Image: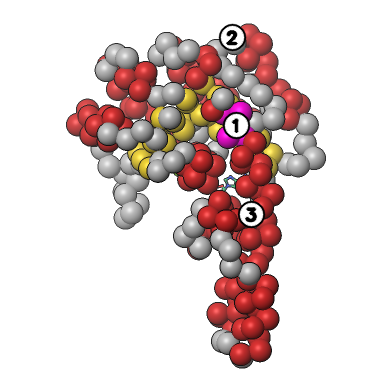
Amino acid sequence: MKIAVINFSGNVGKSTVAHHLLAPRLEGAEVISIESINSDGTETAALRGKEFDELQERMMSRTNVVVDVGASNVEDYIALMQRYEGSHEDFDRFVVPTVPALKQQLDTIATLNQLGELGIPSSKIRLLFNFVDSKANVTKVFARLFEQHRKTSAFVIDSSAVVYENPIYEKIKSVGKTIREVNDDPIDYVAWNAQALQDGSPEHERARIRQMVAIKRLASRVTREHDDAFRLLVH
Ligand SMILES: Nc1ncnc2c1ncn2[C@@H]1O[C@H](COP(=O)(O)OP(=O)(O)O)[C@@H](O)[C@H]1O
Ligand SMILES: [Mg+2]
């Protein structure tokens, strides 16, 4: 399965979804990130044909791939897919994460329109609602997108394809593992914390263990939520 995670908007959760929700559920999947921001903060030139060729090669040498198309590259990427006719056929799914803010919903509609114009079949384009408040009514919060779907039917929309807002995404950044890995991790951090207290371990070490207790407690529900969303996105 080859999946592109794409949206003209930044901060909708593309990288989060690629690393925590999609890649861990596809055997041996690699996440390929197309980001134009260098680590020194400067922007590189636009995504070029040469890089696109390299990407195509990397994709073709793998069975399972998740491509995270950074917001600053989406336009170039879509233009290149237009030039290399049929290249979008390499993907089985285009997952489009979106969030409640109006601007992001409008950007999402623009993204969906562009994908439709490339001739990508609607069944491959899957919307994913992110940053959802657990008490929110999805069809109300994302009313514009449901309306767009009624008009075009150019993508798949399902009010159950949801990622809830959760502090785990922030907390896990310093851990260097996926949520799924932490969830499957057999270490009993509560017991380890008790032991560390008894041993008089330094505070910074105990703080890390406490942090892992919190993350692991959050991880089990989030893992189930990701399992459910994944099923809806790939089936
Ligand atoms: N469901 C969520 N709940 C809470 N924070 C989230 C959620 N999804 C993403 N985030 C946070 O929002 C920020 C933007 O997410 P990111 O995946 O980097 O977006 P993008 O790749 O689209 O720019 C990150 O700090 C991430 O940890
Ligand atoms: Mg990103």
Observer-side mark, 1 or 3, equals 1
* CB within 8 Å, label 2 to label 1: no
**Residue lying furthest top:** 151
Q: Residue sitting at 67 percent across and 76 percent down?
A: 191
Q: Seen in the image, is 229 located left or right of residue 19?
A: right
Q: Which residue is mark 3?
A: 219
> Circle 2: is it few (<14), some (14-19), or many (20+) Cα within 10 Å?
few
Q: Secondary structure at mark 3?
A: helix
Q: 87 or 117, which is in the foreground?
A: 87
- Which percent across, then down, holds residue 1? 43, 30
Q: Sequence order check: which comes first, mark 2 or mark 3?
A: 2
Q: 44 or 25, which is in the foreground?
A: 25
Q: Amino acid at mark 2?
A: Thr
Q: Which residue is mark 2?
A: 152
The scheme the figure's colours follow is secondary structure
Q: Amino acid at mark 3?
A: Ala
Q: Seen in the image, is 87 located left or right of residue 151?
A: left
Q: Which secondary structure type mostly characterizes the magenta part of the structure? A: helix
Q: Quadrant of residue 79?
A: top left
Split into 4 quadrants, where in the image is the C terminus?
top right
Q: Which segment is the magenta one?
A: 229-233
- Label 2 and label 3: CA atoms lie apart by 37 Å
- Which percent across, then down, holds residue 146? 67, 19
**Residue lying furthest left:** 50
Q: Which residue is mark 1?
A: 231
Observer-side mark, 2 or 1, equals 1
Q: 229 or 5, which is in the foreground?
A: 229
